[in-house]
Amino acid sequence: MEIKAVSRRILKECDYLGKLMLSKKESSILAPPPCIIFAPTDKDGRLGYYDGEQNAIVLSEDFLYAEEKSEEEATFLHELAHAIDYKKRGYSRHDEYFRALCLSIGVPSGFEKAKVRTNHEKREKARNKVAKLIRLSSSPFENESTEALKMAQRLMAEYGIKEEKDAEVKLYSAEIDSKTRFYFHEKIFVSIITRLSGVLILREKRGTQASLNAYGTIEQVEFAYETYLFLHKALKDAYKREKDGSIDYFSYAAGLSSKLYERIEKEGDGEVSKALSVINEDNRRKFKEIFTSSRISGRRTKTSFQSMSAYERGSIASRSISIPKDGKVIKIKKIENKK
């Protein structure tokens, strides 16, 4: 599962890098060309990697705030070389052949090596220092406030840090499932996750495949992904415990998911639910601002049940399932590891 950052700036940056890729004649063998993803980094500060399974070049979102773009372009070309190498040989290593390929597409010297990294911790320390200096800049002592502001501005320029008021609208996104058809119980699971976290989950079509994509904070999309997996596992485990294995699975799943949703509506704190609805609407608004041409539509569709008895048994089984709470899910590795 890949968490990625989305904003209008990122869409523009992906377009620019896509054109840079097409300008390299060696990339003509890439069909389809790899998609470009900006993702959050962990403390190891890795700049990027090429994911052969997803056919994606993943770059650190820290690049977006840097004034100088040469490092971003160099890293992108390094990962593009991996994509081309992977296509030609079926694998890619930092060997002599790879270094020659880097040279042919214009990867700057030093960026053909493995594990090129940036100091993520250093940037975080700078961000914290900037926050303190901005607070000091409101000091009643003129010299102190002026010097604090100057130092803050120097650090902001060096590390590409922007003031909160100037920050652009940005969301994080993760694909939580992809298939040709989603069933009624899976749509209910989406409603459950939204109720628990306020995340915005949209069903988006790509050719014959449809995907469920979660939009929100990093924590929200992590929670959405893990909880969706949890609900599927809880459903399958409950179904396996049934003595009669011949009962209709989808009717059973519809009963179990519907009852879980009712429990959340009944047992939930009204004030918390209201707050999560506000968060969901805020994520929806941000999505519309970023993807200005996209339409948002989402509703649960009714379904007919082949077996009402299976539906009832699913409803009863839902009582044994503990509804997950936000903050009690396994945190997902971000850019340093791919799943």
Image (tube, rainbow, N blue to C red):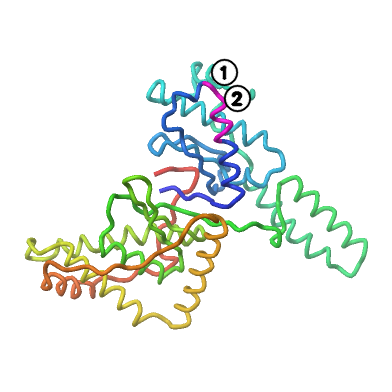
Please state the horizontal and vertical placement of residue 184, each as a whole percent of the image: 26, 64
Q: Tell me where the magenta segment starts and ends, as one range.
A: 18-25
Q: Amino acid at mark 1?
A: Ser
Residue ID at (21%, 65%)? 253
The foreground one among 302 and 145 is 302
Q: Quadrant of residue 21?
A: top right
- The residue labelled by disc 2 is 107
The foreground one among 174 and 16 is 16
The foreground one among 26 and 92 is 26
Q: Quadrant of residue 258?
A: bottom left
Please state the horizontal and vertical placement of residue 311, each as a whole percent of the image: 16, 71
Q: Are marks 2 and 1 in contact (CB under 8 Å)?
A: no
- In the visual, does 20 lie left or right of 88? right
Please state the horizontal and vertical placement of residue 290, each as a whole percent of the image: 56, 55
Per the image, label 1 sits on a secondary structure element best described as: helix
- The residue labelled by disc 1 is 104
On the rendered image, what quadrant is the C terminus found in? Answer: top left
